Image (cartoon, rainbow, N blue to C red):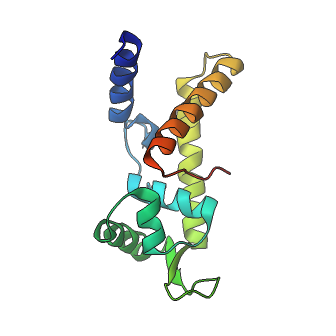
Amino acid sequence: MGEAAREVEYEQMLLGRHSFLHQRAGRRRHGALERSAYILLSRLEVQGPMSIGELSDAFGLDASTLNRQTAAVLRAGLAERVPDPEGGMARKFRMTEAGVEALREEREGVVASLDRVMADWPEEDIAAFAAYLRRFNAGIERLSGRPWPRP
């Protein structure tokens, strides 16, 4: 492993431990989305209704894990089960209006936190950072065989 890859590993580990982006005023906001709900709703937002099998393939998680995650968003009223819009047998999960709004609010909060973190960065540095993150994620998706659709 090259020295630069070691630096990426270390910084990626540090990034993963930060919960700052999902915090307001130093503590978790009441009503904030759990990380798994944030990711699940983000996928439904870009892809549309998905079955447990499709979610399992997309996330590389077993159905029991996804059943727990989808049960939580169903209980919270953030998603609902609907017949397959294409006429298939499996029921699918679709975001509710409350889910759309909760995701929008959470995303706005994360973007506001990012704005504070990068307040002294030139716009071209932020754009370059976003491009590198997109490239990094695309490499992971290519190796895992699980591409993430982008809006």
Task: List x then y, in percent, for residue 96.
Answer: 57, 73
Residue at 39% in and 56% down: 36
Task: List x then y, in percent, for residue 56.
Answer: 41, 65
Residue at 52% in and 25% down: 117
Task: Examine the rendering and report whether any part of residue 34 can be seen.
Answer: no
**Direction from residue 48 to residue 65 in the image, left or right:** left
In the picture as drawn, the residue positioned furthest to the left comes out as: 64
In this picture, is 89 found above or below 100?
below
Q: From the image, which quarter does the N terminus lie in?
A: top left
User: Residue 6 appears in which quarter of the rendering?
Assistant: top left
Residue at 58% in and 39% down: 111
Task: Examine the rendering and report whether any part of residue 40 can be seen.
Answer: yes
Task: List x then y, in percent, for residue 132.
Answer: 58, 27
**Direction from residue 132 to residue 66 in the image, left or right:** left
Residue at 60% in and 21% down: 119
Report the front residue among 54 and 30: 54
Report the front residue among 124 and 136: 136
In this picture, is 32 found above or below 122?
below
